[in-house]
Amino acid sequence: MHRIFSAALAGRSMNMPHDPSGQAEHFARNRYYDRVFDYDAVKILPGEYFIAPTDMVLVTVLGSCVTACIRDREQRIGGMNHFMLVDGDGELTSASARYGAYAMEILINHLLKLGARRNNLEAKVFGGGRVMSSLTSSMVGERNAEFVLRYLKTEHIPVLSQDLLDTVSRKVYFFPQSGRVLIKRLTSLHNETLARREREYADRMRGAPVAGAVELF
């Protein structure tokens, strides 16, 4: 039986140090106990990320957004982010892509601070579905998928598996210690929660300044 979140776990992964780059505001805080898997769990919303140095499950639901599940295969620690490019093209140097680059960098940086090594990192990527009619013409899902693959190739982080594009939403369960990922493809979404959440996230990003650079190790 996996224990409910303890103070020891919180001290290692939840408490963010003083961080002038603003990483802490993106650190997911929606924690719960998943009785189906018998695991401590964290739900990651658009614009958030989380690092799990212990055995637990990270969960997110994706429409047009993408998630990168990145782990150190030797240290067995990993994390997940959830992001979207909001405007422009998917070039790594574009203003829009800097949102995606920031989401990737804060995840990688936090892993390295917890003892991960860059040459041990591996990734699995998901999402980029064409599920929001208001964003179909901009091909935002396609740009998100193209961006995350290109970014990881540039950073020399191998992609072990992927489930990208298509016209479905996905619920992703990532178990960082083992690297296992389970995908539930949501062929019919019976409410507007996901679409509303992604629209609100996109609107929020358009009105915010582009994130500054984050130091890479």
Image: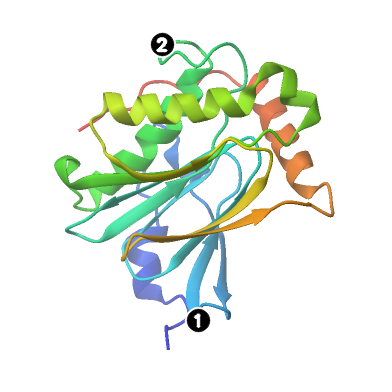
| Vertical relation: 155 (above or below) 4 | above
- Residue 37 placement, left or right of 155: right
Q: Residue 152, how many percent across, how many down?
A: 33, 31
Quick check: can you spot residue 19?
no
* SS under mark 1: loop
x, y percent for residue 25 = 52, 42
Please tell me which residue is depicted at 48% across the width and 80% down the height of the picture.
Answer: 4
Residue under the point 27% across and 46% down:
122
Determine whether, in the image, residue 156 is placed left or right of residue 61: left
Amino acid on which the number 2 mark rests in the picture: Thr
In the image, which disc is placed on residue 38?
1
The C terminus, quarter of image: top left
Along the horizontal axis of the image, is 98 left or right of 186?
left
Residue plotted at (67% across, 46% down):
169
Disc with the residue nearer the chain's start (2 vs 1): 1
Q: Which structural element holds mark 2?
A: loop
Residue 192 in view in this figure: yes
- Quarter of the figure with residue 136: top right
Q: Would you name the residue on which mark 2 appears? A: 93
Q: Could you classify mark 1 by the number of other residues whose Cα lies within 10 Å: few (under 14), some (14-19), or many (20 or more)?
A: some
How far separated are the C-alphas under marks 2 and 1?
Answer: 42 Å
